[in-house]
Amino acid sequence: MLQHLSIENYALIRSLDVDLAEGFCVITGETGAGKSILLGALGLVLGQRADSAILFDKSRKCIIEARFNVKGMDLGRFSGAPSGSDESDADKEEADSFFDVEDDTLVLRREVLPSGKSRAFVNDTPVNLSILKELSSILIDIHSQHQTLTLNTSAFQMKLLDSYLPDTGIAARYRNAYDAYLRCKREVEDLENNLMQWQKEQDYWRFLLEELEVFNPKAGEQAEMEEALERLTHRELLQETLTETASALDGDEYSLRSRIESVVRNLKKIASYHKGVAQSLERWDSLLVELTDLSSDISRWAEDDDSDPAMKEHYEARLDELYRLERKHHLQDEDGLIALQQDLRQKLSRAETSSETLASAKKELEALENRLEALAEEWHQARIASARVLEKAIVEALGRLGMGQSRLDIHLDKTERFTASGMDKIQFLFSANVGAEPREIAKVASGGELSRLMLAIKSVIHQESLLGTIIFDEIDTGVSGQIAGKVAAMMKEMSACMQVIAITHLPQIAAAAQAHFFVYKSVEGGTSVSKLKRLDEQEHIRSIAGMLSNDKVTEAALKAAQELIKG
């Protein structure tokens, strides 16, 4: 149940703290006093969209905190992951971090900053908004006039029926199979599209591959051929230069090597007389060794010229073909051609095996379709059985609300294709009068009848749930007199197993409450602010008397209020 609500800096509320009560609570007040503001603030802490426009003081953040007593509640239903998604380890860890509650208390908090950004917390642990929404859906149900209108939609009707199923596991089993079916169906469609495309492209791919196979590019050959071609192009210059250089280095008695050897011999003659000369001899010897090695290399290159002039034409032709293929495929080097060659081989291989893969995928899809059809039929039969039970329960509840002649028929028809909710389409047909055939709810139910029908549905559905709190926002629209008393009695009956909070204008409903809260406006510092207080016994009586009378509360109204409360 909702134990405590704290609101700071929201709309017309500067600061508000209220302790709620168990059982049946009502909230009353003049139109515009701020009852809708309370619900707006509560909706925000339950995960609704935030906007900085709601700030009372634009320079300060808004803080809304709701404390729930969760003793005996089935929080195991909460997955800790956004609805419809797989639960990740991170989500599970986040959920576990705040499910270790103390004193059976769970605190939801929402902060909205002046920038418009917001933060959400559960037991002081930061959480994603999706987690806040899913958790709040277990803790509390807010029923508004707008939700009464959704009673006409098939999606809402199906959700109502499914919430009444004794075997809730069938929905999960079907949806798991449905997800697998969709994945396999997409795979088959992709394979079919790919196969069609591959069949169109196969001949072209084969032509490209054959062209590359004939050329047979090799890693590193472009640089090698370019270097060899450079040598062949300048062969005469290279040969002439190398021969002349070899002769100059070591060709005769006047070569550079002979002359340096002569220098070394002369220096050795005077080394004993000059310390510096003696110290330099090692360097001269090193120079002579290095010169001998260089001379040997030059001589070998000049003698071992293995460049074949006939190869020039071969290199030029192969490089021209290499460059052409690179330009054709928009590649930089032969490595790109080798990678393309491998890719074409893989494409052709996939094309050759795709028919087998497609056949296997189609076989798997057929098996999934059969499984899904069986589960859809199981779900359909479960819905049919529950529909009869739900019809009876709702009609009985309507009888307690003064609509004993009502009929409700829940029609289920099969669809031709699979959907996320099975293969059913649903329609609620309703009649409030004897002899009138049930028709679509929107065509036959008045505003008051819609309100009572929704209240009857809520009372039946929540008898089967472990919901902690339900809030009715002016569900008494179009209801008055004796029927109002019956509505109040049903709400009080519901409050025996859950906390019921009703925002109302009817004295009959307010009189049945175990706790009465009053919303009012006051002026502080020239600004209107909304406030909320819990009424004591005398204030409770006087408030109901005010609802029964006009501007002035009379003794007769006070007496009537007391009688209404006793009744």
Image: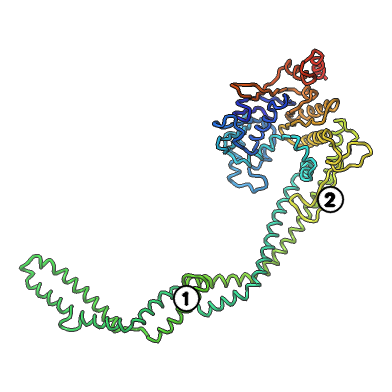
| Outermost residue to the bottom | 310
**Whether residue 165 is visible:** no
Quarter of the picture holding the N terminus:
top right
Q: Amino acid at mark 2?
A: Asp
Where is residue 264 shown, x and y percent of the image?
13, 74
**Whether residue 62 is visible:** yes
Q: Which residue is labeled 2 in the image?
A: 413
Identify which residue is drawn at 19% across, 71% down.
286
Identify which residue is drawn at 70% across, 22% down.
518
Q: Which residue is labeled 1 in the image?
A: 323
Above or below residue 534? Residue 195 is below
Q: Report the colour scheme.
A: rainbow
**Relative side of 74 to 547, left or right:** left
Identify which residue is drawn at 59% across, 46% down.
89
Pick whichever, 62 or 468, lies toward us. Answer: 62
Q: Secondary structure at mark 1?
A: helix
Q: Quadrant of residue 319?
A: bottom left
Sequence-wise first label, 2 or 1: 1
**Relative side of 483 to 264, left or right:** right
Q: Secondary structure at mark 2?
A: strand
Q: Amino acid at mark 1?
A: Tyr
Pick whichever, 260 or 434, lies toward us. Answer: 434
Identify which residue is drawn at 67% across, 23% down.
521
